[in-house]
Each structure stands twice: as structure tokens, then as C-alpha cells.
Amino acid sequence: MSLRFQFMKPAHLILQDGTIFSGSSFGYAGSKHGEVVFNTSMSGYQEILTDPSYQGQIVVMTYTEIGNYGVNALDVESSKIYLSGFVVKELSPTVSNFRARSDLAAYLKKNRIPGIEGIDTRALVRHIREKGAMQALIVTGPLTNKTSLVKKAQKLPGMEGQDLARIVSCQKPYQWKKGTESFMRASKNARRQKKYKVIAYDFGIKQNILRMFVDHDCQVKVVPGDYPAQKVLAENPDGVFLSNGPGDPAMCTYAINNVQKILGKKPIFGICLGHQILGLALGAKTYKLKFGHHGGNQPVMDLSTRKVEITAQNHGFAVDCEHLSDVLVSHINLNDQTVEGIKHKKLAAFSVQYHPEAAPGPHDSHYLFQRFIDLMR
């Protein structure tokens, strides 16, 4: 054993089914709980950490070494870390990147997020794929009472029935003005006249979505997830956006009711949880996936063009719109044939399950923002 590991505290991941994975602690030396899911992205860990859609979850990275380029103030998708814990095979002992301002361990410690390294992540991911995503505890220190800890894990509530979007949503409306260029330097977009007024419902919105709207000449107002539809319509926007977010979409009844009141009056575009909320508002049902889709390499086919997009995804629920006559399935997942996109046959409303803003991830799906612009035009 190297000197590095000899001086690290032990840490343990205790799954709801009684399985225990042990490794070494990094970041915050404390205990947290959440649903264990795995992410297949090779990079982009800071964007993953700050994605509000991971509220209430412990994320396992399938790529072997994480942390080699450190962290910085630019690669964030929200104001803080939302996930409950972070599990990696190996934490890079060195940081090498001109943009780095800190290392991953210090970043997690500052945000009071426990991390575990040195466990067999391949075995853990295979276990989740076979048994399904489940609740778990992260415990730092010696494992003294396994039986009581397993019982504690078994009592943790699952994702079904939880409205986590209300927890991560903003508390009051605000204007967003930064585009993707201003993300790195002064934006030319800031000086361009904004042609379209978009109201964006925040159920756990990622900032790169907002940047993409600014790039497409949109004036963006972000509102809380329970912002009344009457106020939205009174402000007369050109379009309404429904954001990504965590938890069970069926519990977001306030959002579903608002969308039903806006349908047919304003163009609507939804991403991820917003896609599920639109589906529910149109009469579809949602269901929990066995282990969800999390990562930057999910193949999706656009059924109108037969083109295959490689997409970034982060969700544990899916939409079932099999019996809806006015809703067309526009995209499907080529791995498991789940619905990845819908559009209404008569109304100006469409949505996708994946993340076209892709931070991190491929840029194959950027065209969807232009599709929304075309609807507003």
C-alpha cells in the first residue's frame, strides 16, 4: 500500500440491499445518503457535480481516473454542488490544467460533499445494472456496526414520490444575460438586440441552457417552478421553456397544471424533467427506469430525419405516451427504445429527454434551440 492510502480515512458505500463497497475517503469526511447512479462521461465532472438534476443522488463515475484537470470557477452549471456523494476508482494525485484554481478533493471538502476512491467501480456499476439504482449511505471511518447501517439504508425513501424540483428551483424570478461567449470572455451577444422573450421555468436548470438561449438572441427571464401560468401569460413571452431537474415528475402537479394552462397559447420547449412534465400535461404517464441514463454517449434517433445523435443525458424516469393520439414520438433511444422526444401534432409544443445544451457532452443536438426559435418566429 502506498503512503498516500495509508494516511487516508476509510470510507464505505452501504447499499440498500446489504452490499458494501469500501475504499478511502476524500473531500468531506462525513456521512450522506442518496440514490446510487453511474455516469459514463470521461470528463466534465465539475459540470456533473453542479447539475441540480443530481439532487439526492450519489454519483459513480465509470471512467477510471477523475480529477486530473482540477476545478475552476467557469465549469459550473449552478451555484453549488447538488449531489450527495461522489465515487471514483482513482482520484488523480496531481492537477495539470492552466484553468485550474483548486483540486477536486478540496472542492468537495469546501462544499461538504463526501467522496470515496479506491473501490471497484466496475463491480459497483455492474451491480447497479443488474439490481437497479438503489438508496445507499456513505460512511466515513471504521465500519463498526454493519447491521444497523444496512437497516438504516433500507429505510431510506426512494426517488418515486419525491418532489425534488421544488427544493432546487430558484426562489424568485431573475434575468439571465450571459451567452456562451461571455462564459469565457466578453460576449458580442450582450450588445445584440434580443429578438425573442423567453420565460424559463426553473426545476433545476443548467446554466448552459440559458447561455444557449442568449446565443440565439433571446431575452431570458428565469422563474420558480411554481410560478403561476396567469403571470406567465400576462407577461406575453414569445415562448416558454421547461427545464431539467431532479425527482419524480408525477409529483410536480403544480408545474403540470401550469403547463396545461399555457398549452396552445405560447410555444413550449422542454428538456429532461421539462420533457416529462410536458408529457404528463398532455396526458402521458411516467415510470422509473431500472438504472436511468447518465452520461455523454447515449445514441438517439431523430425519427423525422433518421439521423442518430450522440447525446448527454441525466434522468431516472421516462415518458410513456403510447395511447396519446395527438402526441408524436419524435426521438427514441437506440439502446433501450425509450421515448427521447415528443411533439404535439397541432400545438406548438415539443420536448426531448436528453440535454441538447450538452455541458458536458457532444454538440449534435444544438439544432433543437433553433427549432424552438422557429416556433416562436
Image: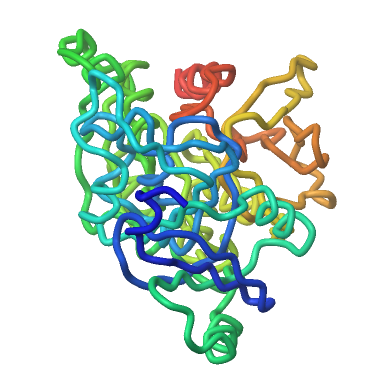
Question: Which residue is pictured at 60% across the width and 49% down the height?
Answer: 38
Quadrant housing residue 16: bottom right
Q: Where is 337 relative to 114, above or below?
A: above
Q: Where is 370 relative to 108, above or below?
A: above
Between 198 and 206, the one nearer to me in the picture: 206
Between 227 and 150, the one nearer to me in the picture: 150
User: From the viewer's perspective, is 131 left or right of 270?
Assistant: right
**Residue 189 screen position, x and y as percent:** 23, 12
| Chosen colour scheme | rainbow
User: From the viewer's perspective, is 308 left or right of 58?
Assistant: right
Question: Which residue is pictured at 48% across the width and 80% down the height?
Answer: 143
Q: Can residue 349 be seen in the rendering of this structure?
A: no
Between 248 and 120, the one nearer to me in the picture: 120
**Residue 136 screen position, x and y as percent:** 55, 71
Q: Where is 109 relative to 100, above or below?
A: below
Q: Quadrant of the C terminus?
A: top left
Q: Can residue 158 be seen in the rendering of this structure?
A: yes
**Residue 65 screen position, x and y as percent:** 49, 36
**Residue 24 screen position, x and y as percent:** 43, 59
Q: How many marks?
A: 0
Q: Where is 306 relative to 41, above or below?
A: above
Question: Which residue is pictured at 58% across the width and 31% down the height?
Answer: 296
